[in-house]
Image (spheres, rainbow, N blue to C red):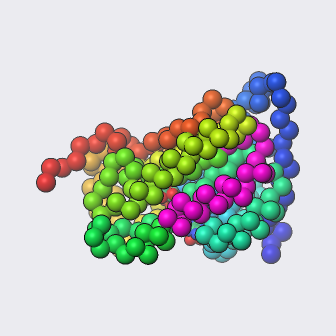
Amino acid sequence: MSDREFRIMPALTYQPGRPFMPGSQKFSLTNRSVVVVGGGSGIGKAVARASAAAGAKVAIASRNLDKLAAAADEIGGNTAYAALDMTDANAVENWAGQLAGVDHLVISASSAAHGPFAELPLDALRGMFDAKFFGPYSVARAVLPKIAPGGSITFFSGVLSRRPGENCSGLGAVNGAVESLALALALELGPAIRVNCCSPGMVRSEAYAALPADAREEMYASTGASLPVGRVGETDEIAHAVLFMMTNPYLTGQVVDVDGGHMIRQYATR
Ligand SMILES: NC(=O)c1ccc[n+]([C@@H]2O[C@H](COP(=O)([O-])OP(=O)(O)OC[C@H]3O[C@@H](n4cnc5c(N)ncnc54)[C@H](OP(=O)(O)O)[C@@H]3O)[C@@H](O)[C@H]2O)c1
């Protein structure tokens, strides 16, 4: 195990009766501890990179240790990392038990399964709920005792919950479940902890690495052309929004769409 794995991060103090961070520190991530599950690639890595650049102490986790080590080098700022399969409840408990203090927890890890409603195997749907709902649910529950008052949890859903796509009914449903969870937890865990859900539109990321390059670019081009912004997103554009979600003390119980206008795009008629 490298000495950067499971680095212990001190909990930061909260002073009741005062703004949770006075003066210029109010919206700051300086010396805050940010834990990103899914931080080895894509949007999570971009969140980790932006957090480190903003002065946070960052820890990332996902399944592949080599990928995490490379990501930690790229992110810089002595990023800590640990291998974690969030569908393994015991592993989640052990991992969370080694965190000393957390200010902001971001859970971008997920995996998706697509297919026509009548054909998508139930096991594929269950696997997706394990990875994208129960995984984040277990992570949030296990890390909760470590989150300092004034801290936050940010979940990830996606546009398909409220702008459905053909062959994506299962993915839309799991996104909707994550959004409901985030809103309910905002109510239950406030005022000490804020909870939000980021809902990205299509973003160039490793999520589409399995597609042949031509098909991937074609998908980006056609989706991008249908959006008011005229293109698909970049991971740093989602990370920018997540930093706002983590640091704005008046933001909770929100699903924040960062989607290039996907919610208002016009679908071609059949
Ligand atoms: N990119 C898009 O167009 C888009 C659109 C809408 C919504 N979203 C949502 O945004 C979030 C981030 O997506 P992304 O594009 O950044 O995806 P990504 O690049 O594929 O990153 C997902 C990360 O999750 C990790 N992961 C997967 N299963 C895991 C598990 N069981 N335990 C721990 N880590 C696991 C993966 O690393 P390992 O394989 O090493 O574990 C990977 O680092 C996801 O919730 C996604 O559904 C993305």
Q: Residue at x 39, y 56 (%)?
A: 172
> 267 left or right of 264?
left
Furthest residue to the left? 270
Name the residue: 40% across, 73% down: 122
Q: Quadrant of the C terminus?
A: bottom left
Q: Where in the figure is residue 4, as x and y percent of width and height?
A: 80, 65
Instruction: Find out whether residue 240 is within the magenta segment.
Output: no
Residue at image location 67% in from the left, 50% down from the top? 105
Q: Is residue 132 magenta?
A: yes
Give the prevailing secondary structure in the magenta stretch. helix
Q: Quadrant of the N terminus?
A: bottom right
Q: Residue at x 34, y 42 (%)?
A: 263
Q: Which of the two residues, 65 or 95, is positioned nearer the viewer here?
A: 95
Q: Which residues are magenta?
A: 129-152
Residue 217, how many percent across, how many down?
Answer: 33, 63
Find residue 69 and report its image quarter.
Answer: bottom right
Q: Position of residue 248 (x, y in %)?
A: 64, 33
Horizontal and vertical percent position of residue 241: 54, 41
Q: Please give left or right for residue 231 compared with residue 152 in the image.
A: left
Looking at the image, how many numbered discs can be counted on the residues? 0
Position of 193 relative to 202 (above/below): above
